[in-house]
Amino acid sequence: MLTGTRSRLRPLLALLLFLVAPSQSLAELRVGAIMSGDIPYYREMHESFVRELHALLPAGEKVEIIPQRPFPDPIAWSNAARKLIALEVDLVVAYGEPAARAVEHEKSGVPLLYAGVYDPEHAGLKGKKMTGCGFKVPLSSLLRYFKQLKRVDSLTVVFSGIEDDSVRQKEELRALTATQHIQLKEIDIRVVADLDQLRSLNETDTVFVTGSALSHLWLAQILDILRQNKVPMGTIFPDSEGGGVLITLYQPPREQGKMAASMAARILRGEEPAAIDPAVQRDTELVFNLVQAQQLGITFPLQLIVEATRVIK
């Protein structure tokens, strides 16, 4: 008799366990994020991404964000990608082209969303499980601004040969300077000791630092060297107001973070990444640092200042 009672109770207990079990829906989704070197540009982009993604989720539903901040190095990028894949995340967000390449190389089938990639139309990041957003800055404009401030016979470009987007910017400048009869000098940053090459420059030189995670990880050291020799510098990643970059022409990271979040929300709802068109942000911010200009003995003409989005005084 007791055995028969237990048999009848088993289906009822199973039903009760099913009813009280926690929801297994969107709350268990996990998003991995790779930020090279945790530089301010990618950090601000990621913070914007997280805020916007949570705002887009239905009330009560959450996504766990698992950040990785590898040193800008091929082995570190690969290890970060493999770790997230091993954790069986539902989506990987990669900031910058090298991080995206590391995830792509694993061929895991995990959806990949890239952000902060320079000129993504020419980066060749394509695949059924991939989409994303990037930016394009008119480097010709940056060169024009410098030429309005001082004579530019040569331009020294600081780039990282292990970062494809940084190399692409260097090659773009090579084409621009060739048409304007400007000598292009190249400094490939791989280890911190490579920064010593900057010590030979002087106030007659002009420096452009590419959007390289490695270069911006060591930006304070670069600025210290250039400041000592009174060398003007421009870049395409935003600089802190006291940093000492003379001209900054950049695409606001917050906007890319928001755009990436809207794409991520669609992917987490079940859309295929390939069905979501990649996007390129072209609206730029132009910042002139008049404090740095004064220290360098450079005067900004009024007609140039009016073009700036922000002026540091």
Image (spheres, helix red, strand yellow):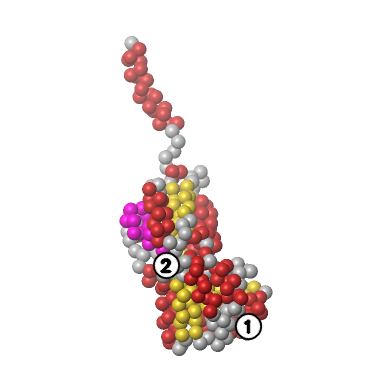
Return the x and y of residue 158 as percentages of the image width and height: 48, 74
Q: The disc labelled 1 sits on which kind of residue?
A: Ile
Q: Is residue 197 above or below residue 1?
A: below
- Tell me which label, 2 or 1, sits earlier in the chain: 2
Q: Residue at x 38, y 69 (%)?
A: 123
The answer to whether residue 217 is left or right of residue 170 is right
Q: The disc labelled 2 sits on which kind of residue?
A: Glu
Check if residue 103 falls in the magenta segment: yes
Residues shaded magenta: 98-111
Q: Residue beneath label 2, please?
A: 163
Q: Residue at x 45, y 67 (%)?
A: 190
Q: Residue beneath label 1, please?
A: 298
Q: Nearer the viewer, residue 118 or 169?
A: 169
Residue density around tag 1, few if under 14, some if 14–19, many if 20 or more, within 10 Å: some
Residue 65 visible in the picture: yes
Residue 276 visible in the picture: no
